[in-house]
Image: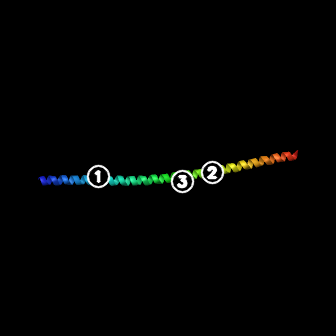
C-alpha cells in the first residue's frame, strides 16, 4: 500500500516538473517572438525616420531653389527699371 502511495506521489511530482519545464519553454518562445517583433518594429521605425529626413531635405532644397529664383527675378526687375530710366 505504501509503495503504491509513494509511486503515486512520485508520478505527481514528475508531472509537476514536466509542466514547469513546458511553461518555461513556452515563456522562452514568447520572449523570442516578442524580441523579433520589437526588432522588426525598431527597424521599420528607423527606416521611416530616415525617409522623413530625406523628404525634409528635399523640401528644403526645393524651397532654397524657389527662393533663389525669386531673388534673381527681383534683381532682373530692378535692372529693368534702372535701364528704363
Real-space Cα separation, disc 2 to disc 1, in angstroms: 55 Å
Q: Residue furthest right?
A: 85
Report x, y in % for residue 55: 61, 51
Q: Residue at x 74, y 47 (%)?
A: 70
User: Are discs 3 and 2 less than 8 Å apart at CB?
Assistant: no
Report x, y in % for residue 28: 36, 54
For disc 2, the marked residue is: 57
For disc 3, the marked residue is: 47
Pick whichever of labels 3 and 1 is earlier in the sequence: 1
Q: Is residue 81 above or below residue 29?
A: above
Give the SS element for disc 1: helix
Report x, y in % for residue 16: 25, 52
Give the SS element for disc 3: helix
| 54 on left or right of 5 | right
| 78 on left or right of 6 | right
- Quick one: quadrant of the C terminus? top right
Q: Residue at x 30, y 54 (%)?
A: 22
User: Are discs 2 and 1 less than 8 Å apart at CB?
Assistant: no
Q: Residues within 10 Å of mark 1 (few under 14, many from 20)?
A: few
Q: Residues within 10 Å of mark 2 (few under 14, many from 20)?
A: few
Real-space Cα separation, disc 3 to disc 1, in angstroms: 41 Å
For disc 1, the marked residue is: 20
Pick whichever of labels 3 and 2 is earlier in the sequence: 3
Give the SS element for disc 2: helix
Pick whichever of labels 2 and 1 is earlier in the sequence: 1
Amino acid at each position: 500500500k505504501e509503495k503504491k502511495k509513494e509511486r503515486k506521489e512520485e508520478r505527481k511530482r514528475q508531472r509537476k516538473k514536466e509542466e514547469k519545464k513546458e511553461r518555461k519553454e513556452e515563456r522562452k518562445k514568447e520572449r523570442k517572438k516578442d524580441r523579433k517583433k520589437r526588432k522588426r518594429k525598431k527597424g521599420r521605425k528607423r527606416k521611416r525616420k530616415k525617409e522623413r529626413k530625406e523628404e525634409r531635405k528635399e523640401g528644403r532644397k526645393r524651397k532654397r531653389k524657389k527662393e533663389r529664383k525669386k531673388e534673381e527675378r527681383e534683381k532682373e526687375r530692378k535692372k529693368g527699371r534702372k535701364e528704363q530710366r
